[in-house]
Image: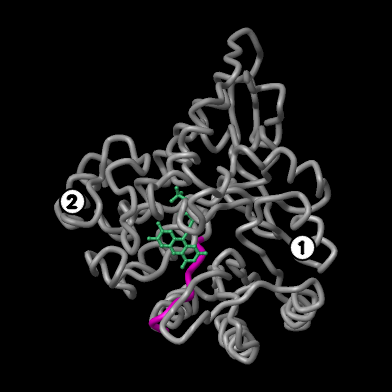
Amino acid sequence: MRMKDVLSAARERLQGVCRVCPACNGKACAGEFPGMGGIRSGASFMANISALNAIHLKVRLLHEVRDTSTACTLLGLNLSMPVLIAPIGGMSYNIKDALPEGPYTNAVVAGAKAEGLIACTGDAMPEIVFTEGLRAIKEQEGYGIPFIKPWADKALFDERLERAADTGCSIVGMDIDMAATRARGGYPFAPRSAAELSAEVKKVHDRGLKFILKGILCPEDARIAEDCGCDAIVVSNHGGRILEAAPSSAEVLPSIAAAVPSMTVLADGGIRHGSDILKMLALGADGVLIGRPFVIGAVGGEAEGVRAVAARFANELHEALRLTGCASVNDANASILLR
Ligand SMILES: Cc1cc2nc3c(=O)[nH]c(=O)nc-3n(C[C@H](O)[C@H](O)[C@H](O)COP(=O)(O)O)c2cc1C
């Protein structure tokens, strides 16, 4: 499917929810939450974009690189490029069912697999967000990463972990940054002490699964996550959807990556072009998650739309590697950045 057709179909179907802007930067949708925007003024969504835009790549043309490789291994998975589709849930209230939860999770899980990537699925209220994600992953023989919310009621974590493990998946995640979300009747989610997190990570490991903790924004928390046994962290401000004053991921990524050099560090927020993937790798990430561009792909063409978006990122990443003199994504480091 051509990107042009994906975008025009998505624009048609997302009317009143997402304008599918030429630059997806959080301006037109500021404060549209629920929706596709960032919370309040949209500042932390926009900060993700402006932090990446402020970084430039050092263009190198006098070198011997001809063939470039985007292939990598992350958390035991062989991927065609270091990209995961970010967990995104709540299609009924975020995109007014322009593509309902079931077809959405099918599109991202199957589309990612077909392109050699992997999709994460979400957890939220209503529970259909979680159950549809599990169903889609099970249909792809466990090829997907279910995310579990940091439920205040620990029994809910145990119950969801059991159901996630039943899909045959090899990795689960938790978006710890939802800890301050309020709902009718109080706070359904809660932060974790180091002892609580260690206990949950142990339960995940006892089932033979790996654990990703998403929403880390400072070196101190990254070190605690490592001490608690987490296999990976995602440096993320939840696409600008948790705190008006949260920093952008690109801004805090270098200090976090330096604090946990032997841990798998992923990052997300504002990645819109293959060169943004390379920038995040050069800032210290081992891989990235990408959210909104894949929502637009799924709405515009279901699995084929997701594949078209993935292919566009891959082409752009190859181009960026060649123009910075990197033969492989493993060659990306701070020396290719101009700041
Ligand atoms: C509509 C929407 C719903 C989201 N739902 C979830 C979710 O259920 N769980 C989660 O961990 N993150 C969720 N996120 C955050 C994404 O996983 C990711 O961190 C963010 O979208 C990355 O930024 P980007 O969209 O600029 O790529 C959501 C984001 C959006 C825009």
Residue in the picture at 56% in, 45% down? 81
Q: Judge: label 1 CB < 8 Å from ligand 1.
A: no
Q: Is residue 122 magenta?
A: yes
x%, y% of residue 150? 60, 76
Residue in the picture at 47% in, 33% down? 50
Q: Is residue 187 magenta?
A: no
Asked if residue 17 lies left or right of residue 107, the reply is left
Which of the pair 217/18 is nearer the observer? Answer: 217
Q: CA distance from mark 2 to mark 1?
A: 41 Å
x%, y% of residue 322? 56, 22
Query: Which stretch did the figure color magenta?
Result: 119-127
User: Is disc 2 placed on a helix, strand or loop?
Assistant: helix
Residue in the picture at 14% in, 52% down? 12
**Disc assigned to residue 225:** 1
Q: Earlier in the sequence, mark 2 or mark 1?
A: 2
Q: Residues within 10 Å of mark 2 (few under 14, many from 20)?
A: some
Corner quadrant of residue 98? bottom left
Prevailing secondary structure of the magenta residues: loop
Which of the pair 46/234 is nearer the observer? Answer: 46
Residue placed under numbered mark 2 in the picture: 9
Q: Residues within 10 Å of mark 1 (few under 14, many from 20)?
A: many
